[in-house]
Each structure stands twice: as C-alpha cells, then as structure tokens.
Amino acid sequence: MKSLFDIVAMITAFAWLTVGTVQAQPPAPAASAVRANLAPHPAPEQPLPYSHKVHVGMGLPCRLCHTNPAPGREMTFPATATCMNCHATMVTDRPAIKKLAEFTRYCRE
C-alpha cells in the first residue's frame, strides 16, 4: 500500500499536469507577422455613380479618362477635372454632375 505522502504527491503532480495542459496556449505571433486575409475584398465605393456602358457606348476610348488604360487588376479614378472636360457642358443639370462640379471646385482651391 502507498503512503499518504505518495498519494498526495501523485494527486498534486496530476493536478499540475492537467492545469498546465489546459492553460497552455500557442505562442503569440510576432509583432511584425501579418495574417493572410484570404477573403475577397469588396470593390471600393465610388464617390459618384458612373456607367462604363454609357461612356464606352459613346465610343470614348479608355485612355481618354484613365492614365493606365491597359486592362489590368487595378485602374485608377480619373481626376475630376478630366470628367469636367466634357461635363462642363454636357448633362450639367443632373445631381451627380453637380456633385462632380463641386468636387472639382473643391480640388482647385
């Protein structure tokens, strides 16, 4: 038969081993580590409504507005002044064009 000391020692050792494994956590990632985000990113919100169908349908080439007109994954927004080259005289009564004109005035200030 085991002595009382041996039984208490075994219970204590078991308790320490159990608590140690339950509380064990994986090491924290290094401060410079960046986790991969595999989720698709949403398209950026356009500040004004725009239809490529309308503009391309009128025969306007991509390079008229875009500085990088080659097809690719990243296109840039044209400067508002570029849009206003045409919209200073075309469909100026529409709310989106009025907002575009405000953006253009703000950018010039």
Image (spheres, helix red, strand yellow):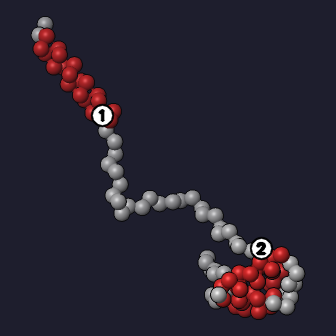
| Residue 105 picture quarter | bottom right
**Where 31 sits versus 90, above or below?**
above
x 17%, y 14%: residue: 7
Front one among 13 and 87: 87
Three-letter amino acid code at the position of disc 2: Pro
**Residue 55: quadrant of the picture:** bottom right
Q: Is the C terminus in the top left, top right, bottom left or bottom right quadrant?
A: bottom right
Residue 91 at x, y = what percent? 87, 84
Decide if residue 47 is on the left or right side of residue 74.
Answer: right
- Left or right: residue 4 versus residue 15 is left
- Which residue position holds label 1? 21
Closer to us: 39 or 66: 66
**Residue at the spot x=71%, y=89% of the render?**
81
Name the spot of residue 9 as percent of width and height, x first.
16, 19
Residue 49 in the image, given as x and y percentages of width and height: 77, 73
Q: Amino acid at mark 1?
A: Thr
Q: Secondary structure at mark 2?
A: loop
Residue ID for mark 2: 49
Mark 1 burial class by Cα count in 10 Å: few <14, some 14-19, many 20+:
few
| Label 1: element kind | helix
Q: x%, y% of residue 10?
A: 18, 20
Q: Residue at x 33, y 58 (%)?
A: 30
> Going from the N terminus, do you reach mark 2 or mark 1 first?
1
